Image (cartoon, rainbow, N blue to C red):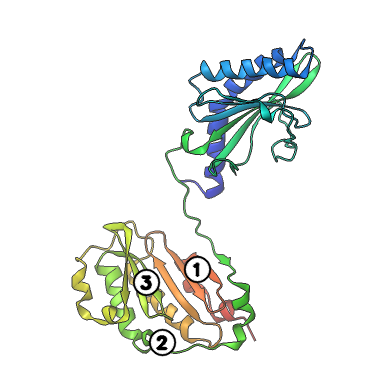
Amino acid sequence: MNTFDETIQARKKLLQEHLGGFMGRLAEQCAVGCEHQTSKQSVADRLDEVLKHALSDCDELPACRLLYVIDVDGIQLSSNIFSEDLRADSSRIGQDLSGRPYISKVVPADGFFLSDVYISQTTRRSLITAVQLIRTNEGAKGFVCADFELGKLPELDQPTEDRRIWMQVKGDPFIRSTLFMQSRAISPMDDRIDDVLATVDELVVERGVFHAKLHFASSRATIWLYDDPYRYRIHVLDEILNPSICLAYPQRTYPKEAMVPKELVREVLERFRWLREMDETIYLRAGSLNTINGIVALNFSCDGSHYLPYEEFLERDESFWFGSD
């Protein structure tokens, strides 16, 4: 499996290989359309013909939304030609597209590149634009552009891998600004924390729960089952404290895929208690453990959140979380 950035680059490379040949041939045809024309309108008419023919006679572009041509300054020379019905929107001729990020992109030697992904102002869906330089005997004349819907493009089989690195995300600035005006209130879950941690440990180690989140301030727990991962269950404190809760979930062998050793689950949960009780101002509001990817997630009273691998979480001492004197 690949990292987040590696997956993105691999998919863009796949698209370049898939589209590069077609875009090169289309640019050659557009170059002919740009030559020996007597007016801007005749250039537009000829380019529209080329683009329509390309869409009607090509099976390589099932995801293409539209084609259009711009000059080197970003001014549109052709109509927008839509693939669905070969409709030509001539009102776009002459519009200035120089502000689009891919227009100012450094052009590689082969003249072909892909834009970054962006949201269509029309469909509000993710698009990517393939851009091919148009060259004639007189030099660069512009670019032929093809907008593609990401949902219809060829995919790689493998997804991105979880980023097992420490990440800190700042929360609501208003909550941070009033942090030292508040102090921790003892919740009903705090009063019964020993029983809560024992029950959650049993649910994770013996009852098929692979992801558990404890909401200390609101005295509830959210759990995800290995056998039913697409739905979560919410339990209030009275349900968590009822020893019969374990009867509600069938006994399961601790999953082999789990990154967290089962003997360390309780240690992670005990660290939640420690972060909850260590400081009266900066304290843990909610903590979760995913045993499959080994990630611990924490939300503090300052509304800041942390995501980090369980082994790193267990190594962090008081100075990391609260600073040294």
Q: Estimate the x, y position of residue 226 in percent, counting from the top left.
A: 29, 59
For residue 239, what is the image quadrant?
Answer: bottom left
> Looking at the rendered structure, which numbered label has been put on residue 264?
3
Circle 3: element type: helix
Assess disc 2: are there few (<14), some (14-19) or many (≥20) residues with their C-alpha within 10 Å of its C-alpha: few
- Residue at x-position 47% and y-position 33%: 154
Q: In this view, does 317 lie above or below 13?
A: below
Mark identifier at residue 73: none
Q: In which quarter of the image is the C terminus?
A: bottom right
Q: Earlier in the sequence, mark 3 or mark 2?
A: 2
- How much space separates mark 3 and mark 2, taking CA atoms? 26 Å
- Give, as a three-letter code, the residue at label 2: Ser
Q: Residue, x 70% and y 14% (percent of image)?
A: 33
Q: Residue 187 carries which label?
A: 2
Of pointers 1 and 3, the one earlier in the residue sequence: 3
Quadrant hosting residue 220:
bottom left
* Residues at circles 1 and 3 in contact by the CB criterion of under 8 Å: no
How much space separates mark 1 and mark 3, taking CA atoms?
A: 13 Å
